[in-house]
Image (cartoon, rainbow, N blue to C red):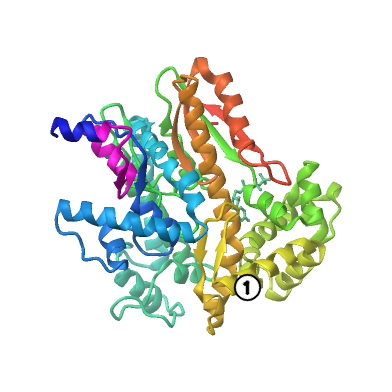
Amino acid sequence: LTPELRALFEDSKVPKRVHDLKLMLHVLCGLGVELRGPVDDAMLLSYGLNPTHATQALADVAARHSQPPPSSLPAAAASIHALVTSLRAEAERSKIMSVYTTIDLPLAPVLYRMEKAGVRINIAVLDGLSTRFAAELERVGEKIFSLAGRRFNVNSPKQLGEVLFKDMGLPAPNVRGKGKTISTAQDVLEQLAEINEVPRLVLEYRHLSKLKSNYVDSLPLLADAESRVHTTFQAAATTTGRLSSVNPNLQNIPIRTELGREIRAAFVAAPGNQLLSADYSQIELRLLAHFSGDPLLMRAYRQNEDIHTLTASEVFGVPAGTMNKETRNRAKAVNFGIVYGISPFGLAAQLGIPQAEAKAYIERYFARYQGVQAFIDKTLEATRREGAVHTMFGRVRPIPDIESRNPNQRGFAERTAVNTPLQGTAADLIKLAMIALDRKLTERNLKTRMVLQVHDELLFEVPLDETAEVEELVRTEMEGVAQLNVPLVADLGFGSNWRDL
Ligand code: CTP
C-alpha cells in the first residue's frame, strides 16, 4: 500500500464508495489501515432496493444495471462508483433510503467488530461430544438395520430408497428425486415416519450426523489460536431483512433438542468473563399487537398477562385457572401460526388434529382477535396494491406472486405478506439495538464485546466487573429501541456457557 493511498483511505474528508463495507474493513484491517470518512456501499444499497435477488455480488448487481462484469480491479472500482450513483438515485426515489442510512450501513462496522471478536469454544467439550455423537449414531444405525432386516449405508439415498420402498414395501411418494431414484427427502420421510419406525429413525440419524459434521467436528477446526470461532454474518442475503450466518452457521444450532443444547454448552466465555444472553420476548407477537392495535392483545401485553394462556381460554374456552400445559402449548401453536400466516392444513399437521377442527380454531381466533383479522386484511390489500410489503422502518420486500393465479403460489405469497412486516420489523429493531449498544459500549470504554446475534437474541462476553453495568445497559437499550403501543421486553441471563444462562 503506497503512503498516498493510505492517506486517502484515512482522510476523513474523502468520501468512499465500496461494495460490501464489512469485507472492506476486514481487508483494510489486514493492511493496518483505518477507513475514515463518509462511505456508501453498493451491496447494501442494492439489497435495500430489492432483497429478493439471489445474490448481491458485484458482478450480479452490475449485470442488473446493464454493466459488464468487472474483469479487473480498476474496472471493479469504476463499476462500484457508477453503481453507487445510480443506486443512490433509485433509493432516494423509493422509501428505502432511511433503512440504508440508519440501519444497514451503520450496522456493517458493528458486524465487522463482532466477526473479528469471534466467540470462544471449549474444544475439550466438543471432543467429548464427538465420541457421544458417534456412539449415538451407531446405536440408531443398529436399530435401523435390525428393523430393516439388513445392513446398508443410511447416508446413501439410493440404498435407503431400496430398503424403504422395495424391501419394506412402504408407500413411495409420487415425486421423484434427482435421477430416477425415489425421493427420500426430509418431507417424504416425515410423512412415512407417521406410519413406520424406520423412517423416523433415519430422520434422527440424519439430524445427528448433520450436527456432528457441521458443529461438533468442524468447530475445533475453525477455531483460532485463542479457541475463538469467527462466523461471517451475511447482511444482504435474506428476503426479510434478517441476518444470516455462514462458515459456520451459528444461528442454526437447535435449542429444542438435548444434543443441540449440548453443543451450546461448548460456547464459553474467556477467562475472567461471563456470557450474557439477551433475548427479545415474543417480539413478533408484540409487533402483531402493535400493528393491529387489537384490544385483547394490547391489554395482554400492557398488563403482562400470559398470551398463550389468554389465547387458550379465548379459543378453546378453557378457564385460565384450570389450564394444563398441553392446552397452553396448543394455543401457543395457534399464536405463532398466525404470525407465520397459518392455514388449517398447517395447524392440523402441527397439532395432529383433523383439518376441520384446526379450521374451527382459526375461525374462533379471528372472531376473538378481530383487530388481527383487520390487520391481515389491510396488509394483504396494500400488498396487492403495491406488489410489496414494508416493515415499520420502510424496509421493502416485493411480493409479485400476491396476484398469482396458482393458488399454492398465491397462498405462499399471502403468508409471506403477513409475516414479513412482523419478522422484518423484528430484524430492524434488533439491528438498531445492536448499533446503539455498540456505540454505548465504546463511549463508556467498556471491555464487553457483542459476539453473536441469533435473530431475537444477542450474546455478549462480559468481564466479571462489568456485569451490573452491562446488564442495565443492554436491557435499557433493547427495550427502549423504539416506542411501540406495547412494551418490548428483553430476557437476560448470565452464565459460563451458552447453554446455562
Ligand atoms: N415457535 C413456533 N411455534 C410453536 C412454538 C414456538 O413457531 N408452536 C417459535 C416462535 O418463533 C417463538 C420461538 O419459537 O418465538 C420461541 O419459542 P418459545 O420461547 O417457546 O416461545 P414463548 O412464547 O416465549 O413461550 P413460553 O411463554 O412458553 O416460554
* 196 over 175 or under it: above or below: above
Question: Which quarter of the rendering shows the N terminus?
Answer: top left
Q: Residue at x 50, y 74 (%)?
A: 400
Residue 219, image x, y percentages: 32, 40
Q: Is residue 493 left or right of residue 231?
A: right
Answer whether residue 16 is magenta in the image.
yes
Q: Residues within 10 Å of mark 1 (few under 14, many from 20)?
A: some
Residue 384, image x, y percentages: 59, 74
Question: Which quarter of the rendering shows the C terminus?
Answer: top right
* 123 over 39 or under it: above or below: above
Camera-side residue of 449 and 74: 74
Camera-side residue of 134 and 75: 75
Residue 469, image x, y percentages: 57, 20
Camera-side residue of 43 and 299: 43
Quadrant in the picture for residue 217: top left
* 491 over 87 or under it: above or below: above
From the image, tell me which residue sits under label 1. 345
Q: Residue at x 15, y 30 (%)?
A: 3
Image: magenta residue range: 9-30
* 455 over 341 or under it: above or below: above
The number of callouts visible is: 1
Element under disc 1:
helix
The three-letter code of the residue at mark 1 reads Phe
Is the CB–ligand 1 distance for label 1 below 8 Å? Answer: no
Residue 88, image x, y percentages: 40, 55
